[in-house]
Amino acid sequence: MRSISKEKNLNSKKILLRLDLNVPLEDGNITDTTRIDKILPTLNFLIKQKAKIIILSHVGRPRGKIVKELSLRPIYEDLRKKLNTTVKLITKNINEIKNKDFFKKFDEDILILENIRFYKEEEKNDPKFAKHLASLGDIYVNDAFSCSHRAHASIHQISKYLPSFSGLQLDLEVNALNKITSKITKPITCIIGGSKISTKIDIIKNLIPKFDNLIIVGGMANNFIEYFGNNIGKSIKEKNCTHIVEEIISLSKKRGCKIIYPDDVLVSKDLNGFSKNKDLNQILNDEMILDIGPKTINKIIDVIDSTKTILWNGPAGYFENPNFANGSIKIAKKIIENNKLDKIFSVVGGGDTVSLLNSLNVVGNFNFVSTAGGAFLEYLEGKDLPGITALN
């Protein structure tokens, strides 16, 4: 995989730059700019190299139709304010742009083509459409790791028709995940949450042989709590998962990976209620588990203290209610504390976990925070991502 960061002769080259600017929008306003902020280093690098940047990106799922509410205009406005250069949104139909000479008439350093998913050929990975996109530039750069698990025209097919490179943010993502999965400094720990074990079983099976500790929190921990003979009341759990729990326990014993699940929990009768700390044998039928308890927090903190590398995917509880955010906050603070002492290498991923860290304003206190959802998880499963394969 060739990185654009190593290229020196980009002066006046037209760079087709695939980004993931799929930010959350409400009434045309951006509610979280994390994905935009993360790609600013790539844009600034290309600006410094005096390249002409043509951005390809998407917002939402317009499914091949023009949807006014999913225009890239709010992203264009945000970039215009943040970059010390000129930016223009091109709304002309991409299929009517005949070649890269079209862009000569614009003085702006950065041109943004309208939502690439307004074209049905994009998600079909259409070779003709990809070839047409390629005709608009001299070089292709993929800096959209979070889309790289999609075999779409501007991610996969396009690389067949142009010299293709990875962007700075994509390099950071891949390097961080490689450090977690390949270039490991042991002991290594994974804290994994979420509501469904079945969606993460392949990740867990792929990581157990490489990890020393696997800490199960969140909704999926309820399956383990129940498996070991405890009542979980009306807590969320995934049905028909006993065989998955058994498979995880069996594999972890064979590979010497310690499984850790809650010893005590915080419960309530509803999501908006107050918390009550309980041991696992005290949970009533009308109660639900919404966070880990203090004994469990202390156990996890001890594990973090003995860990050199940590991957965190999924909060420990229902953090949207502050009464059930304590477990996640304590985990975050402990990792940050050890990070500052240079005792640990930390990678965090998953939408809910990133939302939690954003709410605490601590995203910058981890070695790497991934905004990629599906691509992050599929990479951890050991799958080949079409966007990465194309660059290789």
Image (cartoon, grey):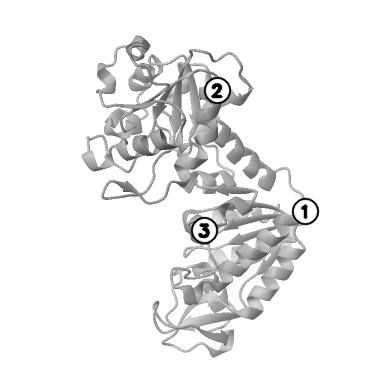
CB-based contact (under 8 Å), mark 2 and mark 1? no
Would you name the residue on which mark 1 appears? 186
Q: Which residue is at a point 57% across and 49% down the rendered structure image?
A: 369
Would you name the residue on which mark 2 appears? 48
- Which quadrant: the C terminus? top right
Image location of residue 28, percent across then percent down: 28, 46
Image location of residue 43, percent across then percent down: 50, 29
Upstream in sequence: badge 3 or badge 1: 1
CB-based contact (under 8 Å), mark 3 and mark 2? no
Between tags 2 and 1, which lies in front?
2
- Disc marking residue 250: none
The quarter holding residue 81 reads top left
Callout 2, which amino acid? Lys
Q: Is residue 354 rendered to the left or right of residue 119? A: right
Callout 1, which amino acid? Lys
Upstream in sequence: badge 2 or badge 1: 2
Q: Which residue is at a point 33% across and 31% down the rendered structure image?
A: 116
How many other residues sit within 10 Å of disc 2, few (<14), some (14-19) or many (≥20)?
few
Q: Which residue is at a point 38% across and 39% down the rendered structure image?
A: 78
CB-based contact (under 8 Å), mark 3 and mark 1? no
Q: Is residue 373 rendered to the left or right of residue 309? A: left
The quarter holding residue 333 reads bottom right
Q: Distance between the residues labelled 2 and 1?
A: 39 Å
Image location of residue 90, percent across then percent down: 30, 25
- Which quadrant: the N terminus? top right
Q: Which residue is at a point 31% across and 34% down the rendered structure image?
A: 117
Q: In this view, does 1 lie above or below 279?
A: above
Q: SS of the residue at dot 2?
A: helix
- Disc marking residue 353: 3
Upstream in sequence: badge 3 or badge 2: 2
Q: SS of the residue at dot 3?
A: helix
